[in-house]
């Protein structure tokens, strides 16, 4: 599967994520409206994210990964910038 990288993702974000691979948080989408998404993390916590840039078609129940240090969200074969709301 090819990955599309949003134009909002800066090279330093990709470097930060690559140098800290254990910082990714896995979870499931429990609410999404195109500009925000709420994730239920596998740790039991929830986090609400503001998606920066082009809207990502994220469906409720979809598995995602969030890198809080690099502020990246990986979902639907797209890597985009996402910040806590």
Image (cartoon, helix red, strand yellow):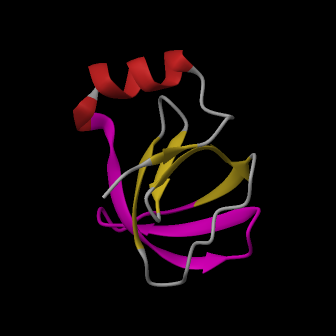
Residue 77 x %, y %:
43, 59
**x 75%, y 46%: residue:** 53
Residue 39 x %, y %:
51, 67
**x 42%, y 63%: residue:** 45
37, above or below 21, in the image: below
Residue 8 x %, y %:
68, 34
Residue 83 x %, y %:
65, 43
The rendered magenta stretch, by its main secondary structure, is classed as: strand
11, above or below 39, in the image: above
**x 22%, y 36%: residue:** 22
Count of all numbered marks drawn on residues in the image: 0
* Residue 56 vs residue 51, the one in the foreground: 56
The stretch drawn in magenta includes residue 83: no
Q: Quadrant of the N terminus?
A: bottom left
**x 40%, y 18%: residue:** 15
The stretch drawn in magenta includes residue 36: yes
The segment highlighted magenta reads 23-47
């Amino acid at each position: 599967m090819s990955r599309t990288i949003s134009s909002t993702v800066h090279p330093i974000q990709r470097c930060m994520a690559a140098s800290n691979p254990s910082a990714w948080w896995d979870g499931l989408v429990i609410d999404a409206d195109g500009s925000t998404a709420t994730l239920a993390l596998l740790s039991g916590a929830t986090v609400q994210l503001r998606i920066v840039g082009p809207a990502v078609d994220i469906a409720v129940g979809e598995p995602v990964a969030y890198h809080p240090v690099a502020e990246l969200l990986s979902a639907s074969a797209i890597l985009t910038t996402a910040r806590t709301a």
